[in-house]
Image (tube, rainbow, N blue to C red):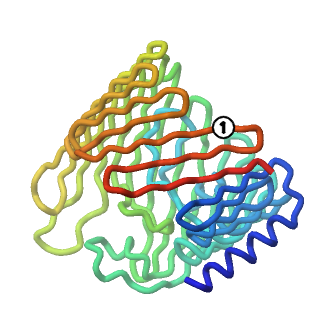
Amino acid sequence: MCMRKVTAALALAFLLALPCGGATLSLYSGGGLYYRDEVLRFDSRSMEASLSTGLLRLGSIDEDLVDLALSGQQAPWLGRLASDELDISGAALVLDEAAVFLLSSPRPLLGLSLKPGRFALSLAYGGRTSWEEGLMKEHTSRHGPAAFAMALGWLGEHLLARGRFSWVDEVGMMFQLSLGAAWQGLGLVWTRGGEADLAVLDEAVEDEYVVFLDTAPFSFTLSRTLHDKAVRPGTYRVKEGRVSVRLALGRLRLSSSMTSSFSAKGVWEDEVSFLLGYRGIMLGWDSVDGFSISLGRDGIRFHWEDGVYALSARFDGRMGHVRVRLESDGSAEAVLTLYL
């Protein structure tokens, strides 16, 4: 704990000594700080830091070109259900539509991505890592063997075609194909095949289709996904279906979603949610936490869910703002944010 405080103090002194036009600094009542400007970002609570200047990206990398090399679940259109959000760290050199990167997390990786216009090419190699024996997955997804992946495709305004070749040590070759079309907000994306799990995703897609419609004020998404095969005898292939609907009319917002999954338990499990919002009032219900209500106006908000309520407030000034949150269990937090 002492070492963390010393590191945070040194980092603060270093950051404040730098030119920081357009920077923000947040101080937390429970201890810790968060600093961000156009070049640097530092969070003492998670001890994560990143640097982005010119062609160089270091630390936590938020870069679509890197994601393109790690996962086959990529599509250029709104309404497409996104795959697991990738949390990556390392170093990257980015120039317009090209990137070379060396990652330390989620696993040691070396890669290259090119995206001139609608065309996309990516290469990635991950070295051998320790096995995750507890996972009930194919050994292609346990992140132990060395793996290589190459993807080639066209991510157009109306058409998507992408092929992905993977080679996994001790397993062999795999292929994955994605095809899609979109027009006037209506689209379909279909994916079939296996891939090396370089991004250490929770689940790898083996067969999936997604149908979506995104035209104001209405949006609709329907998907059916078959994940990778089970490893042990007597288990089942994981199936999952999702449907979501959203309607926005002025300040009125209605939304509903349902997820139904069939897993190794051998039974279907459903999760359903509904939300009604008007101005600062939101009423919701879901099958996990039950009923919820949220009321807010002029920076003050009250939220109640599953028997727990919280009161939060935000006060803005020229030099920054203060956020305070109180919960019924007695916990409290205050955050002071300064515009530097």
Against 280, residue 305 (above or below) is below
Toward which corner of the image does residue 139 lie, by quadrant? bottom left
How many marks overall?
A: 1
Tell me if 280 is positioned left or right of 105 in this view. Answer: left
Q: Quadrant of the N terminus?
A: bottom right
Determine the residue positioned at 35% across, 27% down. Answer: 255
Query: Residue at horizontal 46%, vertical 20%?
Result: 279
Q: Residue at x 44, y 70 (%)?
A: 173
Q: Residue furthest front?
A: 330
Quarter assignment of residue 114: bottom right
Residue drawn at (79%, 53%) of the image: 38
User: Which residue occupies the extreme right position in the image?
Assistant: 19
What type is the residue that disc 1 sits on? Asp
Relative height, residue 138 to residue 71 (above, below):
below
Q: Position of residue 190 (x, y in %)?
A: 40, 41
Front residue of 218 and 252? 252
Q: Position of residue 109 (x, y in %)?
A: 60, 74
What x and y, as percent, mark residue 77? 54, 34
Q: Secondary structure at mark 1?
A: strand
Residue located beneath label 1 in the image: 316
* Image side of residue 185 versus residue 247, left or right: right
> Which of the pair 32/332 is nearer the observer?
332
In this rendering, position of residue 58 left or right of residue 124: right
Q: Would you place residue 64 above or below residue 7 in this image?
A: above
Q: Residue 138's x, y, as percent? A: 31, 72
Estimate how packed mark 1 is, as few (under 14), some (14 to 19) or many (20 or more) residues with alpha carbons within 10 Å: few
